[in-house]
């Protein structure tokens, strides 16, 4: 495997819900919003943990590949494919919680807070959508590696591996940009709610 995807920010990006409203006066927020926030935070932590495990295991796959131990690499790829399915399900659950948060925003007293809240949730939803795309690319990468490790001519799969990694790196840049946007908006929301 010529190079790894740039994974910086993925763990942080999946934790974005965790920091939401850390100092907000929760008495002002609707109960539905708080419940979805708490559920979203738990899901984001689970996704972050799974992402960290993926990063570690991708390094192990690369090491097995470099040693020519394709059997060991295949075993690791199989485990990561299962983890990718689990992450995708959790990201879909996170989108549902964001939808619930958005639905409860009209019950926030301040119109300004509602506006910042919907903007923050919109940025967060876009970010999670990119994480779903990233996860789909990860599955493509793992499938490509599986074919490589089963092939009589593994070099045939190198170009496709590079192509997938480039797309994943592009997605990471977008995820990081959306995370920055979200952080700014949620801080504005938080400040408005606390007034």
Image (cartoon, rainbow, N blue to C red):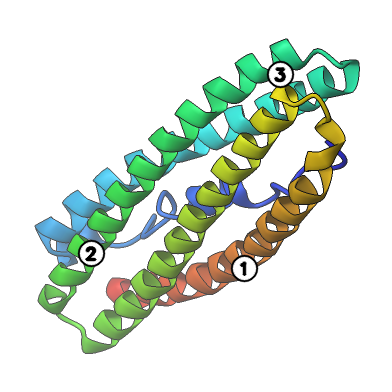
* Residue 147 higher or lower than 4, as above or below: above
Disc 1 crowd rating (10 Å Cα; few below 14, some 14-19, many 20+) is some
Q: Which residue is mark 3?
A: 73
Does residue 109 appear left or right of residue 136 in this picture? left
Q: What whole-number distance in Å separates the C-alpha atoms at marks 2 and 3? A: 39 Å
Q: Is residue 195 visible?
A: no
Does residue 149 appear left or right of residue 32 in this picture? right
Closer to the chain start, of discs 1 and 3, is: 3
Residue 81 rendering spot, x and y as whole percentages? 52, 30
Say which of 37 and 53 sits in front.
53
**Which mark lies nearer to you, 1 or 3?**
3
Secondary structure at badge 2 equals: helix
Residue at image location 44% in from the left, 53% down from the top:
19
Q: Which residue is mark 1?
A: 174
* Residue 186 higher or lower than 113, as above or below: above
Secondary structure at badge 1 equals: helix
* Residue 165 higher or lower than 108, as above or below: above
Q: Quadrant of the N terminus?
A: top right
Disc 3 crowd rating (10 Å Cα; few below 14, some 14-19, many 20+) is many
Residue 126 rendering spot, x and y as whole percentages? 44, 69
Q: Quadrant of the C terminus?
A: bottom left
Residue 99 is labelled as 2
* Residue 146 higher or lower than 113, as above or below: above
Closer to the chain start, of discs 2 and 3, is: 3
Say which of 155 and 111 sits in front.
155
Residue at image location 51% in from the left, 67% down from the top:
183
Q: Is residue 125 visible?
A: yes
Closer to the chain start, of discs 1 and 2, is: 2
Disc 2 crowd rating (10 Å Cα; few below 14, some 14-19, many 20+) is some
Secondary structure at badge 3 equals: helix
Residue 44 rendering spot, x and y as whole percentages? 41, 44
Q: What whole-number distance in Å separates the C-alpha atoms at marks 1 and 3? A: 30 Å
């Amino acid at each position: 495997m010529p190079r790894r995807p740039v994974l910086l920010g993925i763990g942080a990006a999946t934790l974005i819900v965790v920091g939401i409203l850390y100092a907000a006066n929760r008495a002002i927020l609707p109960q539905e919003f708080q419940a979805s926030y708490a559920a979203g935070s738990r899901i984001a932590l689970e996704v972050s943990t799974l992402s960290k495990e993926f990063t570690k295991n991708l390094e192990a796959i690369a090491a097995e590949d470099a040693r020519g131990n394709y059997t060991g690499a295949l075993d690791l790829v199989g485990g990561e494919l299962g983890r990718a399915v689990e992450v995708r399900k959790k990201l879909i659950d996170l989108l549902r919680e964001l939808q619930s948060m958005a639905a409860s925003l009209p019950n926030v007293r301040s119109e300004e807070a509602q506006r910042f809240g919907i903007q923050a949730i919109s940025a967060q939803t876009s970010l999670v959508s990119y994480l779903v795309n990233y996860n789909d690319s990860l599955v493509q990468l793992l499938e490509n590696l599986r074919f490589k490790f089963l092939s009589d001519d593994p070099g045939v799969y190198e170009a496709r591996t590079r192509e997938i990694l480039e797309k994943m790196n592009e997605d990471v840049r977008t995820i990081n940009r959306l995370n920055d946007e979200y952080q700014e908006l949620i801080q504005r929301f938080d400040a408005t709610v606390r007034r």
